[in-house]
Amino acid sequence: MTNLGGGLRPPSEPPPKSQNGLRGRSPRSKRTESPGELLEVRVQPRARRNEVVAQADGVFRVRVTAAPEGGEANRAVIALLADALGVAPSRIALVRGAASRDKLFRIERGSLTLPSPRRGEGDRR
């Protein structure tokens, strides 16, 4: 290779190949997954009551009385999930869907199980 000064290379020489096949990608841009489990949630704001309902397809439906303005409903969902799952609200992080009804939360704990409803609670028909 002929040194032309200033970092230039002859036009016949191809650009150097990167090791991972990605050009211009910063090493900091690699996503590192933090520990915890992901929980898909469908939120219904301005509901009659606050409740968490498990769905058959694995997506939880969360109904909150808070309005979806200024992040109020998101904070209510985090508080309700924390209470239902038995974890601190600080252990729940909104990963995706801040302005959407469909949200993805990361819960930092072992397993996700909802406690069974106590006698007299739950659906009344």
Image (cartoon, rainbow, N blue to C red):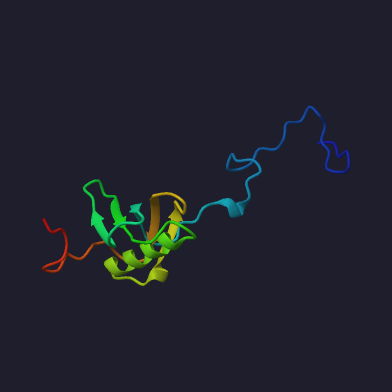
**Residue placed farthest to the right in the image?**
5
Q: Is residue 12 above or below residue 21?
A: above
Residue placed most toward the observer, 60 or 31: 60
Question: Where does the image place residue 102, in percent across and percent down from the top left?
Answer: 38, 49
Question: Where does the image place residue 50, in percent across and percent down from the top left?
Answer: 29, 62
Q: Residue at x 58, y 43 (%)?
A: 20
Classify residue 51 by image quadrant: bottom left
Instruction: Classify residue 65 as left or right of residue 3.
Output: left
Instruction: Classify residue 68 as left or right of residue 9.
Output: left
Question: Where does the image place residue 30, in percent across and percent down from the top left?
Answer: 55, 51
Q: Quadrant of the N terminus?
A: top right
Classify residue 107 by image quadrant: bottom left
Q: Residue at x 39, y 59 (%)?
A: 106
Q: Residue at x 45, y 57 (%)?
A: 33
**Residue placed farthest to the bottom in the image?**
88
Q: Is residue 11 above or below residue 116?
A: above
Q: Is residue 104 above or below residue 8?
A: below
Q: Residue at x 47, y 60 (%)?
A: 71
Q: Number of marks in the image?
A: 0
Question: Where does the image place residue 95, in percent across and percent down from the top left?
Answer: 45, 55
Q: Is residue 50 above or below residue 18?
A: below
Q: Quadrant of the C terminus?
A: bottom left
**Residue placed farthest to the top in the image?**
12
